[in-house]
Amino acid sequence: MVDRLRSPANTADQATNIDQAWPQIGQGVTLGGVTREGFQGGMTTLQTAEENLASAEAVLTDARNQRKAARHELWELVKRVRSGAKAQFGDDSNEYELVGGTRLSERK
């Protein structure tokens, strides 16, 4: 997906600098049709969006860690089942092959 809404990565820093300079220009001054309150509202909107994104990234990281742990646990079970089939039926058996093992007679 192409991001057509481009803006500098340091937009929030630039906005902070402008917000700090605004009172020196004049409290009630409107610049480019924007009041200081409206400008600060835009800053708050960005901050909220960044906080929401950080929260979502934390949730995603947790979900990925849970998936990784579940995959590892399942892999351990897969190995145990294959080892069990090999031990119970032999390493050249159809049963061992059915659970994903390579039969001894088919190995190089």
Image (cartoon, rainbow, N blue to C red):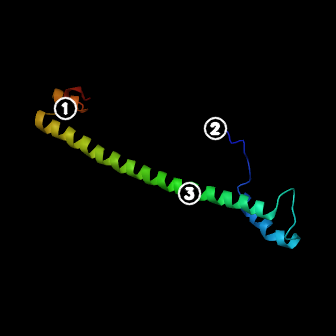
Counting other residues with Cα less than 10 Å from the Cα at mark 3, is it few (<14), some (14-19), or many (20 or more)? few
Residue 96 image label: 1
Q: Position of residue 90 (x, y in %)?
A: 13, 33
Q: Position of residue 66 (x, y in %)?
A: 38, 51
Is 19 displayed left or right of 105 in the figure?
A: right
Residue type at mark 2 is Met
Camera-nearest residue between 4 and 96: 4
Question: Disc 2 designates what residue?
Answer: 1
Residue 54 image label: 3
Q: Residue at x 68, y 42 (%)?
A: 3
Local SS, label 2 = loop
Of mark 3 and mark 1, the one earlier in the sequence is: 3
Q: Position of residue 6 (x, y in %)?
A: 73, 47
Residue type at mark 3 is Ala
Is 52 displayed left or right of 38 in the figure?
A: left
Circles 3 and 1: CB atoms closer than 8 Å: no
Q: Residue at x 72, y 45 (%)?
A: 5
Q: Residue at x 17, y 33 (%)?
A: 91
Residue 81 image label: none
Q: Which is closer to the viewer, label 2 or label 3?
A: 3
Local SS, label 3 = helix
- Where residue 8 sits, quadrant-wise, is bottom right
Count how many numbered circles sit on residues in the image: 3
76, above or below 48, in the image: above
Is 93 displayed left or right of 45 in the figure?
A: left
Q: Which is closer to the viewer, label 1 or label 2?
A: 2
Residue type at mark 1 is Tyr
Camera-nearest residue between 95 and 6: 6
